[in-house]
Amino acid sequence: MHLTIKRPARVRAVCRPWPPKGPFNLLIHCDRHRAERVWWVKSCPEYKDLVESSAAYRNTPFLIIGAGAAALGAASTLIDGGAKPLIVDKGRRPGGRVATQRPSRTSAHWFDTGAQYFTARDTEFRALVEEDVGRGTLTRWQPRVVVATARLETGFEQFTLHDSPDARERFIGPNGLKTWLAERLFELPAEMLPATRVERVWSEANSWRAQTTDGTTVEAARVLITTPPVQAEAMLGQTARAIDALASADRHMAGCQTVVVSAPAHPHFDAAFVHGAKLAWIADNASKYAQATGPTHYWTLHAGVDYSTQYIDAEPSDLAAELLEEFTAITGFERSRIEFVHGHRWRYARPSPSAPEPAEPPYAGLPDNGLALAGDWLAGGRIEGAWRSGVAAARALLDA
């Protein structure tokens, strides 16, 4: 991503150190070496007037809405096909549900709060993954994984642990999965418009229009939407009725309540699939680090579908006590050694049982009219599924 400011301006940037001392001029080039230091740029209110070639932000051959794994697959495919897409996303940083955070901006520690790892079965996706393993932006994760099964004894919930038979090959980012995805996107010769929420998408005069909440209108010959289906349905309005995959869109995705805690390392396992309980997954993020960073360990706790659905409107911090009680029962840690660090509510975390059956190719929409939808909800879940869906949707629009 390359943004050149035409004249001195006050510009807000998510970078280190922040905030800067007073007004400053800014020329930013984001590549894989600086993705950790400079992620997204959001300017003062005169943004569109300050960016050179601002017409690219108003008229583009291909518009991609969303900046997650599906957008990565779509943008790469469009660029390989000779197109230069514009990527618009409501977040200040790319990633979507591929999310990594740090307890503070200066901390050496990090934790994945969204996707924990991914697999690579598809031949094309596997080639991309192996390339990134070779250059060090991805690595294989080989944790000690157990299965924790809940049982009730004398009125108290206890857990039986046994080694997990799931020996699949898992990939992670050595600096968090979000960093890997951001680096991949920043390398692309694509225009990006961050911190911009698309409110409405409609067709007009043989093209498409997208209106953002700040009043900007983008005209595009073709549009590819990678947001969760309920958000895509809201953007498209009446047009959504013509897309079968968006029927009952509000039931296609399930939520996930997530809590991160600091706790000791466990002597016998790094991660656990949890059955029959409120939790569904726990993992020690320190097991993903390339090198030890001290005695502090940050554990990610994902609640299960049923529990998350029941309490989807609750603040994660309000659920922490219940989830930490289970975490204590699974790990055997003393409660005094566990501290709540962070919580996140994912309203649209994973495909639900009512999501459309995965199809081939895994996309939806009206490609002959220049509109396509992509996302893991059309491909059976997983980062790989989202990427494959983005690729398929982009190819459909290129061929239309």
Image (spheres, rainbow, N blue to C red):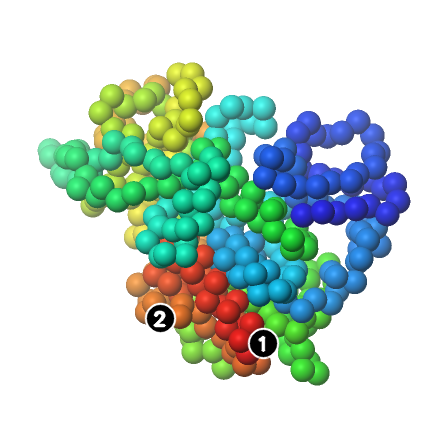
- Which kind of residue does numbered mark 1 sit on? Gly
The x, y position of residue 291, in whole percent, is: 42, 22
- State whether residue 71 appears in this view: no
Front residue of this view, candidates 310 and 298: 298
- Residue 241, compared with residue 219, is above or below; it is below
Q: Look at 42% across and 60% down and name the residue there.
A: 388
Q: Callout 2: few (<14), some (14-19), or many (20+) C-alpha neighbours within 10 Å?
A: few
Q: Position of residue 354 (x, y in %)?
A: 33, 67
Q: Which residue is mark 2?
A: 359
Kindly give the residue lying farthest to the right in the view shown.
Answer: 7
Residue, disc 1: 370
Kindly identify the amino acid type of the residue bearing the numbered disc 2: Ala
- Which residue is depicted at the point 73% across and 30% down? 19
Q: Position of residue 296 (x, y in %)?
A: 41, 20
Query: Residue 81, image x and y in percent?
Result: 57, 65
Taking the spot 88% from the left edge, 41% from the top edge, the residue there is 8
Q: Residue at x 52, y 39 (%)?
A: 179
> Label 2 vs label 1: CA separation?
20 Å
